[in-house]
Image (cartoon, coloured by chain):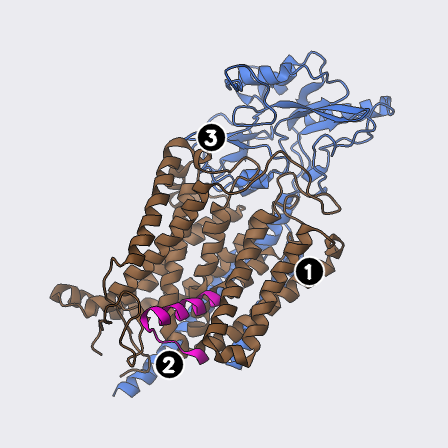
Chain colours: A brown, B blue
Amino acid sequence: MSAHPHPRAIGGRMFDPLMKTLLAIFGVSALFMAYRFTAGIGAVSNMTDGFTWGIWEPINVVVFTGIGAGAFGVGLLCYLLNEGRYHPIVRPAVLVGAICYTLGASSIVVALGRYWNALLLPVVPHWWNLASALLEVAICVMAYVAVLWVEVLPSVLDGAAASSSPRWSAFGRSWGPRLARAMPFIIALAILLPTMHQSSLGGLMLIAGPKVHPLWHTALLPALFLISCLSMGYGAVVVLVTLLRYAWSARHDQKLLAGMSKVNAGLLIFYVALRLADVAWHGKLRYLGWNFVTFVFFLELALFLAPAFMFLSPGVQRNRGKLFGAALLSVLAGALYRADTYMTVYRPAGWSSTGEAIPSAWQYFPSLGETVVTVGMAALGVAIFLFVSRKFPVVVVDATRERSTLGGGRIRAAQSR
Amino acid sequence: MSISRRDLLKGAVVAGAATAVAGAAEAREAVEPSPDAVGMLYDSTLCIGCRACVTRCKEVNGLPHDRGDGEYQQPVDLNGSTKNIIKEFKDGEKRALMKQQCMHCVDPSCVSVCMMGALHKEGYAKRHLEGERKGSGIVLWDKYACTGCRYCQIACPFNVPKFEWASAFPSIVKCELCRHRRDERRSDVYGLANPGCCEACPRQAVVYGERAALLSEARRRIAAEPERYQAHVYGEKEGGGTQVLYLAPAGVTFANLGLPDLPDGSSAQFSESVSHAPYLHGVTPIALYAAMAGAIWWNHRKDADRHGKEDE
């Protein structure tokens, strides 16, 4: 028996009502996407030349990948800082990361006007404009999606090794250890790539200087986005593990999650300190007043500070529900900061020197079609997670609690070890 | 636990500080206008708002007229079929006209952000393009390198590039200074481009020429009739400079005309300096990767040794 508890395939009925609902939602969004590919982006969205990214880029890419950054965050703790006790949550976190990033990358294909030219991107490095922050994001995200799925492979190979088919089983047993030897070099890439592109996601808005409100536009955008991806990621992992416990009696180590959340508290407070210091240092406090922008600014800071103090309170650290709530808040905080930077405080005609939005003819609120595509992509993500963790050993299940409360099926151990 | 948290915080502090400090230290140099750069000068005091330029632009660029219910309609803004437009500013007694099209910036944001150089200064595309000459500074669009990501629309402070929202195979539409109308046999500015709008203007409110010559002409006009003009040439310095220059009537600000109040440095210079600085020309990612791979491999081996013993 090794020190690490082993994850198991959850098994059970694949097409339960939840799965059917998720697939139905995705089905509806697929119709909208099909329509977009025949009639143009304008036909399904409220995007205009003024608000050209709508919600697809800010939510599907910038927020989804923030949620998926749990893989990055846990990897950082588990492998780089060698905190081996985080091992049981690595696989679910990596799977969520792989799914979020894949959905982010595929949403981009829907959002790109001339998606067929995007196929060129990976094959024509001599065309690359290295000055472009978006190029960095595109290449880095593509590479990272591949790396994340390679990180998911050990689960698949473990599943294969335990399979009843002799050929499949031999395949799993011979390739599992080979992959394990290469893993340190893949994991290092899985830490480097998100460090680069998560900061570049903030860097994307550097050039939109006149259009992003001065309280948000700063040279620290890359640093703030990097910190916020980690705070979102750690929060998302706590949320995930808690949900998995309720759904499948997954191993839920309160002490472990509380420990990780203390790291998160540090990040959240650091974010707020950096943000406030930057605003004060550059004399931007004068933009604060009795207006909407100030409200959004303080709402964000409050959303960052509330979970930070909750994470540090022993009462919350002991209580599963409270920790879950705090973690959810930390995901929301990062999501709001990101959505605000890209949408809420973005004005095509810019901001006046007193911080008033300069009026323009463009107004934006997401259309039904846009929203359905975003929700559908999220539903697909949950469906893929359910599928993979039912089929392959991803989630660590407590041996003492054998009964699943969702799907009704008994938990099937994929590994006899 | 306390060790890892401290390490993590330390790392974050260093990363943040490095971004801030290096951003100032290793700035990307400013771009100077090319000596052969061509552009336009629009004098708002001469324009009578006849819109002959708008119509001519549509004709020479093969762009469809905007039609609402089947009748001809004036477009209200630049759009997927309008590369040039005349707008009017009115505030009580104050009234002024404004012509809007691509500014052909000296250091364009759209070019800085474009992933494969679809938007590029003539002669500086990322892929080889036959017949493009260096120096004109005209910002051109290459349909074979554009992914339709629309980052140019986010980046452009003038909101110039437009997208064909109702098309399944959309293009980015913007003024290319009628480069396609150049006369290859000529060695002067008409050998580079020949904007239809300047040709159509009955009052020469908009004229085409070398940027340097247009700039001195603009200054000459201000000096000759200081009571007539706002004492400033928009585009000389704004956002790193533009190749289309503007004169506004006295009493009307450029902001009134819809031109953004930009700092002298370009957004591209700021953004590239900040985002490139931490990379130290590619050294940082490689060093970081090597260090992390080493550390993880070491941890991994230590773990394997320990577990090996436990398993025995």
Q: Which residue lies under the disc numbered 3?
A: B171
Position above or below: A320 against A111: below
Choose the circle earlier in sequence order: 3 or 2: 3
Q: What element carries label 3?
A: loop
Q: Residue at x 53, y 70 (%)?
A: A264
In reply to whether residue A246 is colored magenta, the answer given is yes
Q: What is the distance, in whole Å, between disc 1 and disc 3 at their CAs? A: 40 Å
Q: Which amino acid does label 2 sit on?
A: Lys
From the viewer's perspective, tell me whether residue A355 is left or right of residue A308: right
Type of amino acid at the residue the image marks with label 1:
Asp
Q: Which chain carries label 1?
A: A
- The residue indicated by pointer 1 is A278
Q: Are marks 2 and 1 in contact (CB under 8 Å)?
A: no
What is the x, y in percent for residue A238?
44, 70
Instruction: Provide the residue span drawn in magenta.
Output: A234-255
Q: Is residue B84 above or below residue B305?
A: above
Callouts 3 and 2 in the same chain: yes
Q: Specify the principal SS of the magenta part.
A: helix
To which residue does mark 2 refer? B302
Query: Considering depth in this image, is A35 or B181 the residue closer to the camera?
Result: A35
Neighbor class of circle 2 (other Cα within 10 Å; few <14, some 14-19, many 20+) is few
Q: Which chain does the residue under circle 2 lie in?
A: B
Q: Residue at 59%, 32% (x, y): give it.
A: B160
10 Å neighbourhood of mark 3: few (<14), some, or many (≥20)? many
Q: Within 10 Å of the Cα at label 1, are there few (<14), some (14-19), or many (20+) other Cα atoms?
A: some
